[in-house]
Amino acid sequence: MFVLAVGSDQGIYCNYRTGETWQTAWTKIPGGQTKNAVAAIATGGGGISAVITGLDGKFYTSWRDPSSGTWTPWASLDNGTGSSPVTVAGAADSDKTAWVLTGNNKHVYTFIQENLIAE
């Protein structure tokens, strides 16, 4: 089980539980910052994909590789102004994750991203 949260420094932090034990410290996902909530979903192959609205108002995503435990750099999902993600769709299949987000302009945006599964 994974939990993602926004810290007082506006950074994104992750903690996870293996069996009955939680990790003793929160791990910061490098580079991302937000004033809003973070949305996350389990992807195929045991990965985790997260979406935030950056401090510049754009949507960003990062993905955790289950084999190495490292997070990808935050990548922009759009070039427009976003808002705190309010709706998240589940993984379409083991190779792709679908995101459904609402922008500040009240439009609904969909993004499909490839899951980077280590071979």
Image (spheres, rainbow, N blue to C red):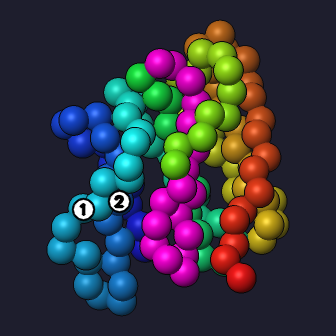
Identify the residue at horizontal 46%, vertical 67% (top origin): 70
Residue tagged by mark 2? 14
User: Does residue 116 lie above or below 5 as drawn?
Assistant: below
Whether residue 52 is visible, yes or no, is yes
Amino acid identity at mark 1: Trp
Crowding around mark 1 (Cα neighbors within 10 Å: few <14, some 14 to 19, many 20+) is: some
Q: CA distance from mark 1 to mark 2?
A: 6 Å
Amino acid identity at mark 2: Cys
Whether residue 51 is visible, yes or no, is no
**Residue 24 locus on image (x, y percent):** 18, 74
**Residues tagged 1 and 2 counted as in contact (Cβ below 8 A):** yes
Query: Which labelled disc corresponds to residue 26?
Result: 1
Q: Is residue 52 magenta?
A: no
Residue 75 placement: quadrant:
top right
Q: Earlier in the sequence, mark 1 or mark 2?
A: 2
User: Does residue 29 lie above or below 101 as drawn?
Assistant: below
Identify the residue at horizontal 79%, vertical 46% (top origin): 112
Identify the residue at horizontal 54%, vertical 56% (top origin): 72
Q: Secondary structure at mark 2?
A: strand
Identify which residue, 26 or 18, lies in the foreground. 26
Q: Secondary structure at mark 1?
A: loop
Residue 90 placement: quadrant:
bottom right
**Residue 43 locus on image (x, y percent):** 65, 66
Query: Which labelled disc corresponds to residue 115?
Result: none
**Residue 15 locus on image (x, y percent):** 32, 65
Q: Which residues are magenta?
A: 56-72
User: Does residue 68 lie above or below 97 as drawn?
Assistant: below
Name the magenta segment's main secondary structure. Answer: loop
- Residue 50 lies left or right of residue 33; in this view the side is right
